[in-house]
Amino acid sequence: MKKHNPSTIAAPAGAYSNGVSAPGGGRWLHIAGQVAIDLDGTVPESFEAQAHVAWRNLLAVLADAGMGVADLVKVNHFLVDAGDMAAYAAVRAGYLGDARPASTLLIVQALARPAWRVEIDAVAWKAQG
């Protein structure tokens, strides 16, 4: 994959790239929105705990497909409270490491269930080998 952060526009403001392209000959994975539902069906109360569970769920889907964070091409982040942005940025950076997928973060009025405070969906690509 190639990251696209041209010098003619502002640098990314966080742990992402402005664009990512992937050559042919690979396998695409579209990951549905992951929320903070633990395996036992519980939803943590704190925002940070919810962010960690949502990321762990996303990583589990990647792993099931034989992929990891380095294979992420695009990630969409949905938060219901703008006040959680700084905490979310720290959680996100911890899971992404040096990976810099294209990224969009939206503050939304609500998610499908009132208890949910964060949702993450993603697209990943891996070369066929």
Image (spheres, rainbow, N blue to C red):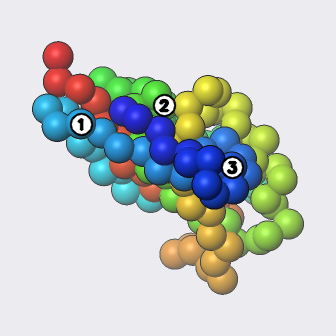
Name the residue located 37 percent from the left edge and 48 percent from the top edge.
123
Q: Residue furthest top?
A: 129
Crowdedness near tag 2: few (<14), some (14–19) or many (≥20) residues, C-alpha within 10 Å:
some
Residue 96 can be seen in this image: yes
**Badge 1 amino acid:** Pro
- Closer to the camera in the image, 68 or 103: 103
Return the residue at label 3.
11
Return the residue at label 1.
23
- Closer to the camera in the image, 23 or 33: 23
Return the residue at label 2.
69
**Badge 3 amino acid:** Ala
Name the residue located 19 percent from the left edge and 33 percent from the top edge.
26
Q: Secondary structure at mark 2?
A: helix
Closer to the chain start, of discs 3 and 2, is 3
* Residue 32 located left or right of residue 29: right
**Badge 2 amino acid:** Val
Closer to the chain start, of discs 1 and 2, is 1
Rendered location of residue 84, percent (x, y): 81, 60
Crowdedness near tag 1: few (<14), some (14–19) or many (≥20) residues, C-alpha within 10 Å:
few
Rendered location of residue 120, percent (x, y): 53, 55
